[in-house]
Image (tube, grey):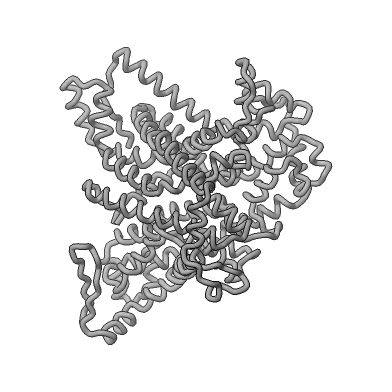
Amino acid sequence: MIQQINTSKTGRITLLNRKGTAAALKSLLKYKYLYIMLIPGIAYFIIFHYLPMYGIVIAFKDYKFMKGVMESPWVGFRFFKQAFASPYFSLILVNTFLISLYKLVWGFPAPIILALMLNEVRTFYFKRTIQTLSYLPHFISWIVIGGILVDLLSPQTGIINNIIKALGGEPVYFMASTKWFRTVLVVSDIWKEVGWGSIIYLAAISGIDPQLYEASQIDGAGRLKQTWHITIMGIKSTIAILLILRLGSILNAGFGQIFILYNQNVFEVADIIDTWVYRTGIQDFQYSLATAVGLFKSFIGLILVVLSNQITKKMGEGGIW
Amino acid sequence: MVKAAGIKRHTISEILFQYENYLVLSMLGIFTVFPFVYLLAVSFTPANELINVGKYILYFPRKLDFLAYNLIFQTDAIPQAYKVSVFITVVGTFLSMLVTAFTAYPLSRKRLPGKSIILFFITFTMLFNGGMIPTFLLVRNIGLIDTVWALIIPMLVNAFNTIIMKNYFMTIPDSMEESAKMDGANDFLILFAIIIPLSAPMLATITLFYAVSYWNDFFGAILYINNMRLYPLQVILRQILNSASSDMIFNVEAHKAATLSMRGASVIVTVLPIMLVYPFLQKYFTQGILLGSVKE
């Protein structure tokens, strides 16, 4: 009569209900208040997360608003082929990868380094102040940061350019420069997230046994050796997991940021998959084409995340699930 | 507790290192705060002194000129946007917390049949979704376009927050629930009278996360709202910052005055609420991240 939950070796969960509907109804009644509680949340997820998944079929149809999803003609992979054949597609793909990669190479170590540095601070109030200040940009929207950047980087009145001019150089229009825009993206992203990102590493560092340092010093280890062999090795699981997860979402190059900061001058270096999908679908009403490309990205993204989760598990660090 | 890594050594290299460390960290602190201080100064700079802004790293006007602030409040674009943003944030956060708790609590009860499946379906939404276009079409077909609810309901429940809440609820001993049940309490009563008071720190953190995401959200409005009166503060700010002339928002006279100060004033006005509450909430952030890193 009791429902059994079997976890087989593959981790799948099967429900063995020996008495069928009668038992099911009985549990429903027993836990009725809990199930009632679940209704709004489940309804939300079904409507706003699973129904749109059904809308993905638009990618395989020539969606005409007037006809609706059901009546629009089926075209199979036509829009996928159309997208892949376009040279612009490889542009947005390359941009997505490169921007993600730059952000990874520069932005992933930054919070770790910050955590290491904060960890060396002996004065409580200084450490706490710097921490509090460093989290602040995380809570500010990209629109505000965009406004700040435009003013600070302005060719006429911006501080950065004034410094450049004072040093004898020519002012640079950073926000419109194909040479500098990606740098602006990476640097502002680091500025925004380095503090927040350091929290988890600081938490991990606090779990390291202080006696290890004493022991290593007796063995003659200097600061650098200590930092590497004790601190970094001590948090390597945290680093590994976060790195793998980061790699799993490599197709997300930062839509919110790029959408706010970009402009036509820098499309060729900053247009990513998501920004292209937005313009093509929402502004140009090419719903099917945009959905096709969006689906491609979501699908690859899913594979990457599942893969990275498997990798972290194989490494013995345990995955997200 | 502040644990110091490494051992205190009074060697020259140690002192030098500490110096370096403090210096770099201080610079980080300055770089973090600097843009806001800069914009604050600019917003109070009278038009004729704006030339100086470019000359020095940080220029503070001799006397604070409130002209920029007066100008940006001449039309009710900003106050109206404030109202919208406050409504969305307050109502949205409240509803989100309610529904998230309603979802997290049952899933935290070990014996609930079907809990694992439901959990899986919720977690799955973090990995894969319909994408921007299908979601947009759905919201449009439901009829939420140009309503303030389009800015709340589509982001009502965050799967990650739900899992954090669920994990935390799971740490509350079953005995509390059992003894309450013996006294005849139903699950709703247990949730509100026992579980929630016991989860105050976690709930405060999640409330913060939701509030910030509602306050900062702009893309929802860009997608779903065409009526300017329903634009939240972030979107109005974006319009102000994007237009070379802000004629659409402010009246034409205003444009002739210091545009740079007005831009600064607009930004300050938008971040002010966050700046004000931020110092008081900072202790919750650390908790929040730690809660998030607890795995099942």
Instruction: For residue A6, say whether it is visible.
Output: yes
The one nearer the camera, A240 or A5, is A240
Q: Position of residue A68 (x, y in %)?
A: 57, 73
In the image, residue B224 above or below residue A174: below
Which residue of the protein is positioned furthest toward the right in this rendering? B253
- Numbered marks: total: 0
Please give left or right for residue A80 compared with residue B172 in the image.
right
Give the residue drawn at x 18%, y 63%: A9
Among the 4 quarters of the image, the one containing residue B286: top left
Give the residue drawn at x 33%, y 77%: A31
Which residue of the protein is positioned furthest toward the bottom in this rendering? A22
Q: Position of residue B227 (x, y in %)?
A: 70, 60
Q: Position of residue A205 (x, y in %)?
A: 30, 37
Among the 4 quarters of the image, the one containing residue B232: bottom right
Instruction: For residue B281, say whether it is visible.
Output: no
In the image, residue A283 above or below residue A115: below
- The quarter of the rendered structure image containing the N terminus of chain A is bottom left
Q: Position of residue A145 (x, y in %)?
A: 58, 40
The one nearer the camera, B110 or A312, is A312
In the image, residue A318 above or below residue A57: above
In the image, residue B248 above or below residue B57: below
Give the residue drawn at x 40%, y 60%: B162
- The quarter of the rendered structure image containing the C terminus of chain A is bottom left
Please give left or right for residue B269 compared with residue A293 in the image.
right
